[in-house]
Amino acid sequence: MIERERKVRTQHVALPQPARAPRRRPRRMTVSARPRLLGEVRRAKILAWLREEGSARVRALADAFAVSEVTVRQDLEKLETEGHIVREHGGAFLKSVPQQVRALALQHHDNMAEKRRIGRAAAALVGDSETIILDSGSTTTEVAAALTGRRDMTVVTNALNIALMLGAEPGFEVHMPGGHFKAPTLSLSGDRSADYFRGLFAKTLFLATAAIDVEAGLTYPALSDIAVKRAMIAAADRVCLVADASKIAMRSFTALGGLDLVHTLITDDRIRDADRAAIEAAGVEVVVA
């Protein structure tokens, strides 16, 4: 099956591309150096982790946040009391996951008007008969929605909801990797998913992020997607980051790399002038939707 899929993709994208931009080497993945976090801040980051991953083990959280397992259990107890999670032996899972997966809904519903504008602006950069990669996430889902009606498109995505949306379109050929299913993002992740993208060639990647900072670069709430995103970046000639302005000048838990990974940022008109200037000074084109 994989061999057949690779032959199909080659027909779309393996032709010589004389104007191919030089690849930017991804920076080494890092977990931001940090002191022990105050309890309230740490619990907020643990909740963000669970909203990204769906579940987590106590030991993994203790290692990630450099605290004892007793402290993590206390944090999880507090989050359970507040109604966010359900504890189980050795870990916890997000309380809303079962209903969310049955409804094929994503966790993040904030700033949806801005995300729709970003999605339309991103789709305007794509022509018919192109091969693109769509990352998982609420903003990339809006990119997918804005692409409906195109013809002879090849889409590679790790997002189940995007695959179902575009797979029903007659003008689309949709491919997905294997891997570990992440319920909150309706996506496939992990090393197997990353391996799928190695050796593929696409014109454009529409990449999602949790936070953008000129110094910290692109950061995410948890670790599992980092390898997949790096493989996606390596497979694309052009990397378009789609992120609403609320994510700019913010930092999350794990760093993917610097802004030199990105060619274009597509965001909304709430971006501050100073942030736009700093991002453009880093060599990134900024498109405001």
Image (cartoon, rainbow, N blue to C red):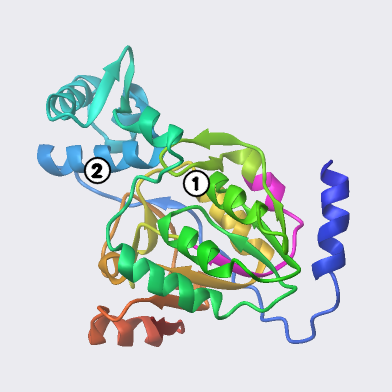
Picture residue at 58% right of the left edge, 53% below the top = 165
Query: Could you tell me residue 110's position as x and y percent?
Result: 27, 57
Residue segment shown in magenta: 194-207
Residue at horizontal 54%, vertical 62%?
144
Please, is residue 75 above or below residue 29 in the view?
above
Q: How many marks?
A: 2
Q: Which residue is mark 2?
A: 45
Query: Which residue is at a point 75% across and 73% down the rendered structure image?
Result: 129
Whichever of callouts 1 and 2 sits on the residue coming sooner in the sequence is: 2
Residue 36 seen from this side = no
Residue contact between numbered discs 1 and 2, judged by CB atoms under 8 Å: no
Give the left or right position of residue 253, taking residue 1 as reference.
Answer: left
Q: Which image quarter holds the N terminus?
A: top right
Q: Residue furthest top?
A: 89
Corner quadrant of residue 278: bottom left
196 magenta-colored: yes
- Tell whether 36 sits left or right of 65: left
Q: Nearer the viewer, residue 125 or 28?
A: 125
Residue found at x 50% / y 46%: 225
User: Residue 21's spot in the image, x, y percent?
Assistant: 67, 81
Mark 2 surroundings within 10 Å by alpha-carbon count, few (fewer than 14), some (14 through 19), many (20 or more): some
What is the three-letter code of the residue carrying label 2? Lys
Tell me if residue 19 is in the magenta stretch: no
Q: Pick the residue in front: 61 or 162.
A: 162
- Give the crowd class for mark 1: few <14, some 14-19, many >=20 residues within 10 Å: many
To which residue does mark 1 refer?
A: 225
Q: Secondary structure at mark 1?
A: loop
Q: Secondary structure at mark 2?
A: helix
**Horizontal side of residue 153 vs 13, given as left or right:** left
Type of residue at label 1?
Answer: Asp
Residue situated in front as seen by the camera: 272 or 95: 95
In three-dimensional space, the C-alpha distance between marks 1 and 2, rounded to whole angstroms, equals: 16 Å
